[in-house]
Each structure stands twice: as C-alpha cells, then as structure tokens.
Amino acid sequence: MNRRRLVDYVQLGFYWLSGLSVLLVLLAIIAYLVWRGGPQINLEFLLERPRGTPLGSAGGIFPAIKGTLWLVFWALFFSVPSGLVTAVFLSEYGSRWRIAGLLNLMIQSMAGIPSIITGLFAYALGVVQLGWGISLLAGGLALGIMIFPVIAVSTRDALQAVDNNYRLLACSLGVSELYALRRIILPRAMPGILAGILLATGYAAGATAPIMVTAAAIISSSSGAIFEPVMALPYHLYILFNEHISMDNAYATALILVVILLIINMMVLWLRSWQERIKQK
Amino acid sequence: MFIKTRDKSIAEKLIVAALTTSAIIFGFMLIAILLFMLQESWAVWSEISVWSFLSGTDWRPVAAVPQLGIAAMIASTLWVAGGSLLIAAPLGFGSAVFLAEFAPFWLAAVLRPVLNILTGIPSVVYGFLGAAVLVRYFESSFDLATGESLFAASLVLAIMILPYIISNSESSLRSVPLEYRHAGLALGVSRPYMVWRILLPLAGKGMLGALVLALGRALGETMAVLMLAGNILLFPSSWFSQGEPLPALIALELGSATPGTLHYQGLFAAGFVLLLIVIAINILIHALQHKLKNEVSRF
Amino acid sequence: MNAVEMSNFSAWYGRKAILDNISISFVNRSITAIVGPSGCGKTTLLRSINRTAEMEYAFSCRGDLQVFGKQVYQIKEVDTVRKQVGMVYQIPLALPLSIRENVLFGPRYHGIREQSRLDYIVEDCLRKVALWDEVKDRQCDAAGRLSGGQKQRLAMARVLAVEPQVLLLDEPCSSLDPASTGLIEELLTSLAEDLCVVIVTHNLFQARRIARQTLFMLDGSVIETGPTDALFSNPLDERTRAFFSGLIG
C-alpha cells in the first residue's frame, strides 16, 4: 500500500513538473530577451536605418520593420481571397460534392508542407521562371502559399461552427444560400475568421526560411517596390547573428519580433473569446 | 401575390460557379506544387537513379564529375527530428495529463494561452536563442571546439514541437468519456492510478497521432536546424556529431545554384523527397484520425 | 380545395426509410395536426413539403407531392417552394439581427426596397402575431433578447413576411410556457382563416383544441386520419387507440 502511494506521488510530481516547465520556458525566453535586448531598444533603434561597419552594428532596424510589413501585406493579398473562397466552398457548398473530402485532405496536407518547400516553389516559379528575381513579390507569394491553408482551415472551421439552424431558418424563407451567408453566417463567424487571418499574419511575419531564398536582402531600403528585394525582421536577426555583426542588436531584434508576435497572439485570444461570447448569445 | 419570388439572378449563379471552380483550383495547389517540383527535378531522376540519389553519401554538385547523394542529409534530418521527439514526448505527455486532469482551473487557463504563444514565437528566434545560449553553454562546460550538433538542434526543436504535442494529446485525453473516469475512481483507486491504467491506454492512439503530427513539423523545420546542427555534409555518426538536415541544405545552397544546372535540380529533388515524406505523414495522420473516430463510436 | 396533396410519397436518409408510401392531403384554410411518437417521421414529412429535408445528407424521395396543384419536386428553383411553404421550427431561434431586420430578412431578399412598404410589412406581420405592441418601441434591438415565446412569434412573423400559402409548424410550443402556448394557439386559429396550417405536436390536448383534422403517424406511415373529434373519441385503428391511451410513445 505504501509503495503504491509513493508511485502515485512520483507520478503526480512528474505531471506537475512537466506542466510548469512549459510556463517556465516561456518566461525564461521572454525574461532573457528583455534582459539582453531591452537596453538597446529606443526610438532611434526603431526608426533609424542600419549603420556602422559592418553595416547593422549600429543604427536601427526601420527598413526591416517596413519590409516585414510589406511582405505580410503581399502574403495576405495572395492568401486571404483564395483562403476565404476555398473555406466558403468547403463549409457551405462542399457537402454536395464528392470532391470536398479530397479537398479537405489536400488542404490539411498543405498545412503540413515545410515552409522551406513553399520558398523553393516560389523561387522556381516567381524568381526564376517568371523572372521577378529576388523580390518582395516572390517573398509575398512564398508566404502567401504558406499561410493559405491556415486561413482556409480556420475560416472553414469558423463557418462550420455557426449553428446550422440559422441556415435552415434562412433557407426556409426562400432566400438563397449566398444571401444567408452574407447576412447571417459570415457576420456570425467574423471574429473567428479574423482570428485565423491574424494568426496567419503572425506566421508570415515570423517566417524566415521562405523569404530567405525568395525576397530577403541584407541591406535594402524596403521601399515597397515589388521587384526589389527587401529587408525583413526575422532575416535581419539571422544575419546579425550569423555574420557576427552585433549580438546586442540581434537580441534587440529578437525581442521586437517576440513582442510583435505576443501582441498578435493576445489579439487572437481576445477575438476567440469574443467568438465564444457570440456563440452563447 | 404581394411579394414575388425573386429569381436567382444570373450574377448569383455566376458567383457560385466562380466560387466552386476557384476553390477546387486552390485546393489542388498541393498537386500543382508536387508536379512542379517533380518537373524541376526531373533531370536528377532520369540521369541518376532514384536509389543512388537517396543512398549516395557524396554531395558534390559543382565538381567536374558532379555527385548527388543525400543519404547524409536524410540521416541528419531523421536524427534531429527523431531525437526531438524523444526529448519532447515524455515532457509533452506529462504536461498534457497535467492540463487535462490535475491542473487547477486557473493554472490551466494560464497554460493554454502560453502554448499558443510558444507556437507563435518564430523559429528564427528559437534558433537564435539556441545558438547564442545553448551552444555557448555546451562549448564552455564540455570544452568542445564547437557546441553545434544534431543534439543541440534536437533540443531546441523539442521545445518548438512541445506545444503541438501537448495540445493535441490533451484533446485526445479529454475525448475519453467521463464515465470511464467515474467508473475508475468509483473503485477507490487514486487519480494517478486511474490515469495510468485507464486514461492513458484509452487515449494512447490519439497521443501517438499527436506525436506523428509533431514529427511532421520537426522534419520540415528549417531555421533552428540551420543555426544549430553545424552544417557539415558528412554522414552523422552519432546524435552528438554535426550534420546538415535537408531543409538547411536547401536554404543554404539555393541562392548559389544556377537554374538549369544539376546543382539546382538536385536541390529540387531533395525538396521533393522531403515533401513526399511530410505528405505521407499527413495522410497517415488523416487515416489514423479516421480509424480513431470509428473506434470511439464502437465503444 | 386541398393545399397540399401527397400520394405514394416515400423518403429516405441514405438507405433508411423514413416515410413509407404516404398518401394524404391538407385542407386549405384550416388547421391539421400531426401526432405520433418521436421518430415516426413527422418532422421529415414537414421538411419534405418545403424541400428543406434535402439539405440533410443523403436525402432522397419518390412519389407525388403537390402544393396548390404544382408538383413540388419538379420545380427547378427550390426557393420558390420554400417561400410558398413557410415553416416554424421547434427551437425558438431569432436570426442574429434586430427585431425589425428579422421580419424583413425575406422581403429584402425578394427585392422590396421602398421604405414605406418595408415599414408596412414590419407592422403588419408583427400585428398578426400580436408582437407589435410589445416591441414597437424597440424594433432595432437585437432579437436575441426576446423571451422564448416572443422569439417563436417573431419566427412566425418572419415567415408571414414572405407571404406563404402553407404554414408548417414543428412542435412550436414544446419549449414554451402555457401562457405563450395559449397565445400562439390563438394566433394559429386566426391565421387559418387565410392559410393552410399544419402543426406537428406532442401535446394531444393542443391538437384537440385547435385542429380541425388530425393525423396519426407511426413508423413512417400514416395510420389514421380524420376530423379531430371523431379521431379522438372513436379511433378505428388499434394502434391509434393505444397511442391515445398512452401505451405507445
């Protein structure tokens, strides 16, 4: 009996420890980044372009922030319309088509494609075959392909979570599905859809591998011209560290990236709780 | 009649038709990507045999007599990913059980968002921290020339895949009907005993699925392995040697490979192999989920 | 004249037969009640008439179903049928819009734009369901805040706004208190002056109170049908008698 109790306590201790370790990892990451990177961050760091020799050892990261924003914009441009259309089809019309099951499987599988592969694909298609060169547009395409399944799946799930009785009610009044979709279903699912898009935005902003081969430059003004390479925060971090340019600035850049992602995640959580509240009404 | 039925306008029919076609086109993008990669790498498959590409240990694409073999990279990929599972699985399952069974309500409410945030942190940040902290630590405390190794990459990858393992395992633990718990506890056994003997066996397959999903993530991860594995094109002799997994190879060499050369095509062939592995894993998960659903309904 | 006419009508979900060779008719300008144990196909029968049953997976049907002399399953535009045959469901559910927009949901789709006419429809339909006086000052409030009984009356107003000729109700009072139930029964009686009303109910007293005709269903078949009083006082079939005395269902 006593041995049994001991085994219980050991198990219980292990469960608690592993649960708390997760919390500890996050706190450690954030605390360490704040400690090492925090002192470098000021307005100048955010709003200046990189300076010093080697370039980036002084000055700021403004072009990288700007470049990341441009990349995210083009990624959303490529993925939001296509993702929404696919999701609406899968959730509202798909049940009548045999093909929907296959489509679901393919989009699920697409979500598992390694990000370097989407970069490889966008490189061959955009950079080489279409002749865009290493460019903002090619990077946007790579990121767009990467986040397309995220948006499609989360939108599909948000639409399917809407009470089916609304569809039944609306159709019983003799209105078309499209009208019911526009007036009832879409507004109902909107927070969930926005949460998915925001989550995808976060992935796009933090992804390095796809843009490393398609869009990123060590130094660029990131003017937003679509056939020019751009700087980007994650790639800038990689370069600062890998080329031994400046550890301090690398920590600061990493901290900025994590803070941006934290904010995005908080907004996603908030949107999801909003969606829950709507559902209960 | 006072209100006439509106005819479905042509515009509306067009919209639905356009919706359907474009959804199908977008959905089949996966096939397009696969075919495209196959086409770009075709020269490799026709000039070098598939087997010698997969089993060759020499990667000298720009030599006078080019050698294309990715066995070393495949081995590195498997070492890194498999190793990360080895580290993450116990911790992940433990946390999942903690969240599903033992965590006080408020703590679970804190931990779940923490998992989301951990998945949201970019891989380059994990890689950077791993390289700047872990690798330095290995170097100084074990007196190594370099702390970069497959093991270091596994360790960081383990942290990255941990949230996926936890949240998917937790949901499969939660999907075990409450009656089993009550039935177990009603016999007067302790909660950990009930978890060990009833819950874990019942949720086991779902937790295995979570592990496979995490494997898919780990295999394709680029930045962390690029910054930690050491990038040496040798066949790894142990977990603690250096290596260059497939994603790192592609990321490092794509920029310098001239389109149309065997080097370029070799990289696409390597990408194609990686893609096939990951897709196979995804289909496996899909089948597993399907089977699980059937089994649960049989109970 | 008969509003709805079914002969040899059968329906399936997948391979499972739900309705088996049904031949009945519903009289215009009167209330018909359908009673029977749970799962006997009452709801599917109603949903076959306004063609919402086909929204469910793997629905199929065969036979003859006419609404005012038109073959329902030969009409190409489903919307026409659904507009002509309105339906109120068991769960009181308001569309997530304002009270006013709930009523106007159908009319707006069917192309009515003039403000005066929209105003007229809202007032007219809400009056018909005796909701106007309760909500006229808060038409733009979210409909979700109404009580169950009010929601169910709003559902009726929403259906009336597209001017159906047949009104189907699937246990509309099953989740309502006696007062709301009484109000809805009153409304149905007055609506039956213009419409064919068909109500599925579990409450035999309700059938007795309001229906002119009653129809008893069991396992997808119509067992017996006739004037309500006759059916209740002197059922011909053994199974009907058993159901009324509480032995089935």
Image (cartoon, coloured by chain):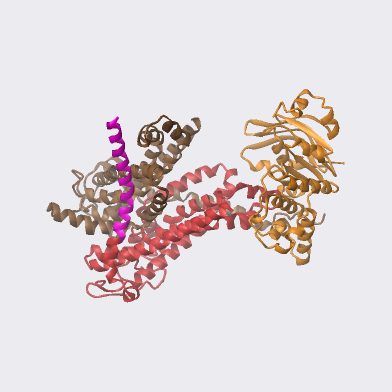
| Residue A7 covered by magenta stretch | yes
In percent of width and height, residue B47 lies at 30, 45
In the current view of this chain or complex, which residue is farthest to the right? C1
- Residue B252 position, x and y percent, is 27, 57
Return the residue nearer the eye: A104 or A27. A27
Q: Residue C23: horizontal and vertical position, in percent?
A: 79, 32
Tint applied to chain A in the drawing: red
Residue, x 47% and y 44% (percent of image)?
A: A105
- Choose top left, top right, bottom left or bottom right for residue B211: top left
In-front residue for pair A216/A245: A245
Can residue B76 be seen here? yes
Chain C, colour shown:
orange
Query: In the image shown, does A17 or B66 lie closer to the viewer?
Result: A17
Q: Decide: is B13 above or below C39.
A: below
Residue with the most extreme top position: C238
- Residue B220 visible at all: no
Q: Is residue C159 left or right of residue A247?
A: right
To which quarter of the image does residue B197 belong?
top left
Q: Is residue B109 above or below residue B206?
A: below
Q: Colour of chain B?
A: brown
Dominant SS of magenta comes to: helix
Q: Which residues are magenta?
A: A1-30
The residue that appears at 45% across and 65% down in the rendered structure is A73
Q: Residue C41 location in percent, x, y?
A: 70, 34
- Quadrant of the rendering where the N terminus of chain A is positioned: top left
Marker count (numbered): 0
Q: Is residue B76 left or right of residue C87?
A: left
Question: Position of C122 compared to B298: left or right?
Answer: right
- Please identify the residue farthest to the front as the structure is shown: A2
Which residue is at the front of the view, B192 or B147? B192
Relative to A207, B28 lies left or right: right
Q: Is residue B132 magenta?
A: no
